């Protein structure tokens, strides 16, 4: 099994797909490496590509604010990363071939972290991690267990910026996530 330093070094130098040609930074992930909860988006946007950190743009700010309301922060108790670690040009959806090339890094991160709960941010991550025909509008907030890990999905923060009427649903999902954390891994809340 990989260790963090070796895994991060390998990922930062990765050339396994064409996204390597257009990236500024590989966006590996952020947060405590013993977190019980992981959040997974689809891929870096412009700000993330420039700064090398996940979810640092307007969407990321909104996400941090909302997660803060249920006691979650990337400094303290969750790890956040993406399905693909390099920015797709013009923020298009990552291609299946790019996801296939990159997903191994996420599996290795999960092996090292061993999260109890994985929250997909948006449809692309949910389709990859929960099921290929995932319907975010219908199925957000539902739980699915796989190999001892509980998965759920919430709307992508960019979708909430585009359509704020989706926010109450997301707050409801986050309260459920808080309840699940209290049940499964209360230590995450110190
Ligand atoms: N959108 C994502 O899916 N991931 C990021 O890191 C930023 C925006
Ligand atoms: Fe490598 Fe993933 Fe970046 Fe493609 S997106 S170059 S597989 S790190």
Image: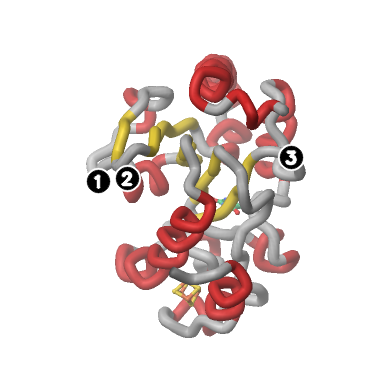
Instruction: From the top left corner, tell me how far across and down residue 128 is, in percent.
Output: 33, 50
Residue at image point 62% right, 58% down: 29
Q: Quadrant of the C terminus?
A: top right
Instruction: From the top left corner, tell me how far across and down residue 51 is, in percent.
Output: 74, 65
Indicate yes or no: mark 1 CB to ligand 1 under 8 Å: no
Mark 1 surroundings within 10 Å by alpha-carbon count, few (fewer than 14), some (14 through 19), many (20 or more): few
Mark 2 surroundings within 10 Å by alpha-carbon count, few (fewer than 14), some (14 through 19), many (20 or more): some
Mark with earlier residue (3, 1): 3
> For this rendering, which residue is in front, 173 or 47?
173
For residue 89, the mark is none
C-alpha distance separating marks 3 and 1: 32 Å
C-alpha distance separating marks 1 and 2: 4 Å
Secondary structure of the residue carrying numbered label 1: loop
Mark 3 surroundings within 10 Å by alpha-carbon count, few (fewer than 14), some (14 through 19), many (20 or more): some
Residue where numbered disc 2 is placed: 127
In the rendered view, does 68 fall on the left or right side of 86? right
Do the residues bearing badges 1 and 2 touch, measured as CB atoms within 8 Å? yes
In the rendered view, does 96 fall on the left or right side of 181? left
Instruction: From the top left corner, tell me how far across and down residue 74 is, in percent.
Output: 70, 43
Residue 187, placed above or below residue 52 = above
């Amino acid at each position: 099994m990989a260790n963090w330093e070796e895994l991060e070094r390998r990922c930062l130098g990765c050339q396994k797909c064409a996204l390597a040609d257009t990236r500024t930074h590989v966006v590996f992930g952020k947060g405590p490496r013993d977190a019980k909860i992981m959040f997974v988006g689809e891929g870096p946007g412009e700000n993330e590509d420039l700064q090398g950190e996940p979810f640092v743009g307007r969407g990321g700010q909104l996400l941090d604010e909302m997660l803060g309301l249920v006691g979650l922060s990337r400094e303290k108790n969750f790890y956040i990363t993406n399905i693909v670690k390099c920015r797709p040009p013009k923020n298009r959806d990552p291609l299946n071939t790019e996801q296939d090339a990159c997903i191994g890094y996420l599996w290795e991160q999960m092996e090292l972290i061993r999260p109890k709960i994985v929250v997909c941010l948006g449809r692309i991550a949910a389709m990859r991690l929960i099921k290929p025909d995932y319907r975010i509008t219908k199925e957000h907030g539902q739980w699915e267990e796989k190999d001892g890990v509980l998965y759920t999905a919430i709307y992508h923060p960019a979708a909430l910026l585009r359509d704020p009427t989706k926010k109450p649903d997301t707050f409801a999902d986050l309260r459920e996530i808080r309840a699940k954390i209290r049940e499964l891994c209360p230590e995450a809340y110190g």
